[in-house]
Image: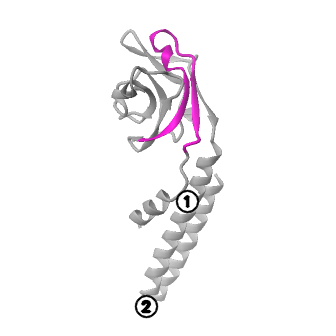
Amino acid sequence: LGVAALAVLSLLPSSAGISFEVKGLTGDVAIANGVYSRTVTIANGYPCYHNVDYQPRSADHGIYLCMDLNGFWSVQPAHNIGTSASWVHSSARRMIFPDEAGPWLTHYAANWTLNPEVTVTAVAGREQPMVMRTIAVLIFGAMVAAAIVLTSMTCADPGIRRQSYWLMSAALTGAVAVMLG
């Protein structure tokens, strides 16, 4: 089922339209302020966003907003994508979107310091991932239901069949609950 789900999800439209704006960075890392647009790069299971306002010397010198090795959203130079080396990182771990992961910490004088001036806000495309999440949840719920139905059809025991239908109902109800938020 997992491979089938990935195959179906790969056919869904890209959420490339989502962007985030980073503001409030000062000093040497002020170059990281700007709008970050989604790329095809994935780091630690999450999409990376490229700073479109920063004009690097070459393609491998860009600035990215990515999930680091420790599960924090981090502002990183291109050569550190996905590592724990960053200039700025979120205080919350494993949030789906970077704008939900603040407040933000900046690296100053060998210490990480909470910096209330740093903000990350969604600027475009937020509704598209919700549509994708809804579709993904419905597909997953349907696949679970199909697996349960197939199991119940091959089982002669009526008690197990009843449990299978109950599980199918619970899986679909759970999928709808997740979809509705």
Left-right relation of 127 to 62: right
Give neighbour class at mark 1: few <14, some 14-19, many 20+ (Cα, 10 Å): some
Q: Which residues are magenta?
A: 16-41
**Among the 4 quarters of the image, the one containing residue 175:** bottom right
Given the image, on which type of amino acid does mark 1 rest? Val
**Among the 4 quarters of the image, the one containing residue 77:** top left
Give neighbour class at mark 2: few <14, some 14-19, many 20+ (Cα, 10 Å): few
Is label 1 in a helix, a strand or a loop? helix
- Badge 2 is on which residue? 156
Left-right relation of 144 to 172: left
Q: Residue at x 49, y 83 (%)?
A: 161
Residue 35 in the magenta stretch? The answer is yes
Residue 25 in the magenta stretch? The answer is yes
Mark 1 vs mark 2: in front: 1
- Badge 1 is on which residue? 137
81 in relation to 107, above or below: below
Q: Residue at x 45, y 81 (%)?
A: 150
**Among the 4 quarters of the image, the one containing residue 56:** top left
* Residue placed most toward the observer, 57 or 100: 57
Return the x and y of residue 19 as percentages of the image width and height: 58, 35
